[in-house]
Amino acid sequence: MLTCPNCGKRNVGEFSYKGSYNKRPDAAASFDKWVDYVYMDENPTGMNREWWYHGNGCKRWFIVDRDSMDNLSHKSQWFSEV
Amino acid sequence: MTKRLWNTHELKKSYDVVIIGGGVNGLATAYYMAKMGQKNICVLESKFVGYGGSGRNTAILRSNYRTPEGIKFYEQSMSMYRGLAQELDFNLMFSEQGHFTLGHSESSMSGLVTRAENNKALNVDSYMLDPKQVKEMLPEIDITDHPRYPVMGALYHPPGGIIRHDAVVWAYCKEAEKLGVEVHNLTTVEEVIIEKGKVTGVKTNRGQINCGKLLSAVAGWSSEVCKKVNLKLPITTHPLQAMVTESYKPWLHHVVVSSTLHIYLSQTDRGELVCGNGIDNYTHFGMKSTLGFLEGYAAHVLELFPILHNVKVQRSWAGLCDMTPDYGPIISKINEIEGFYLNCGWGTYGFKAGPASGLNTAKMILDDKEPDMIKAFSFYRFQNNELGGEKAAASVGN
């Protein structure tokens, strides 16, 4: 089960995982920073901030802080609230 | 009394080469390195050998990849697997029974044709079949237009097959030990010691050991190990779920894979059907099975094989896959840290790479330089914009 900030608790099959949330570097940032942004991932064992999309529901994108170990504890919010 | 295949050892103060990860990649590397004359090697495994992906895969071997680099590498692995039972003196039950990759859409068919042509160019036996030919070899399959995704054709790879995956791990472990490699179970690396940009040792739960060279071969846990040396990887860890059914009389004589339906299916010598799914679509380190997987798999497999409607599931499990952006592995030395080597990014096909991965990784560590065979799998390909393109060949990639 995953919580959508709009629709509430729904089956996780309704959602798509869209990757870790990383702050986009400045256009003038160094090449290494862009490589890091495009390819690298913290891939943490524990809490991770990530994008999710409610494709079979309200079709909204939002941010979830999720525990990748137990997959139960999470907090969902809109991007504007981050 | 049954003879033990390998022994337990006291942890020594110092080893020339330390390998983290007692799976097929770590153990094969240790074995080939010892065979090439390297002494004083140890393998550290936090649980027991074959606990991770090596014991959780669906035991399928094939070399019908898409890119020339991938095809050559996996073909080397296949040819080594053929002689492996003899070399390691252990029955690996390798059965080259033929491997179908089904196509259900124009785009998947075009991907399969590309693979067939690339394979032929590199002397890998692999060709396309139309639905009628598929039906001749798999009489139970439904090739009508009833299913939601009817079968449009298949890539057939005669040398593909299945092997006893645990036996491969045990055999490498046994022979490596014979050559003097020490395999330590229940030994977790807690810290990596780096002095002046060079690896000098590791701290484990059983004490500190010094080492000259360190290899990380921990698949799904690679990001965790590399955090200890401040290295960020282009890897996300996803579980892949699989299950076996009860035993049935032999009816399926080939491996069947469908990437559109996210299915692997093969029958073992015991008669159980081994069923594998695609990776879960979100990152996760838990190794639990979910009802969603069971429902999804059942719905899809019944469209292909309606005769399976009464089949009972015996057990299910999940293994961790370390996915890279281009679905290619990373076998590389790390320039910033002297003496540190990586073997990871295997995604959904690390087991079938075992022998070639071990051999090439062993060469890389001994020469401190990647052999030509694995140059394309460098860690630095991401910053040099030289990505491979194996996504289309991931049997059940998305």
Image (spheres, coloured by chain):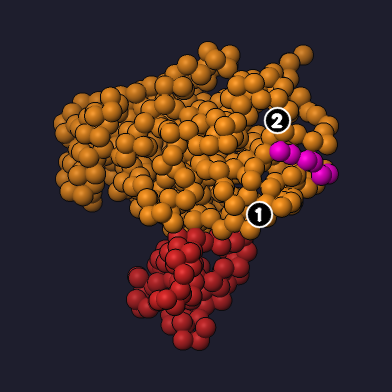
Chain colours: A red, B orange
The percent position of residue B47, horizontal first and vertical second, equals: 70, 41
The answer to whether residue A3 is left or right of residue B123 is right
Q: Chain of mark 2?
A: B
Going 48% across and 68% down the picture, which residue do you hit?
A: A33
Q: Which residue is mark 2?
A: B41
The percent position of residue B64, horizontal first and vertical second, equals: 32, 33
Are marks 2 and 1 in one subunit? yes
The one of A42 and B231 positioned closer to us in this rendering: B231
Instruction: State whether residue B28 appears in this view.
Output: yes
Going 33% across and 42% down the picture, which residue do you hit?
A: B393
Span shown in magenta: B207-212
The type of residue carrying mark 1 is Val
Q: Is residue B149 above or below residue B163?
A: below
The one of B2 and B160 positioned closer to us in this rendering: B160
- Mark 2 Cα-neighbour bin, 10 Å: few <14, some 14–19, many ≥20: many
Q: Which mark is residue B229?
A: 1
Sequence-first disc among 2 and 1 = 2
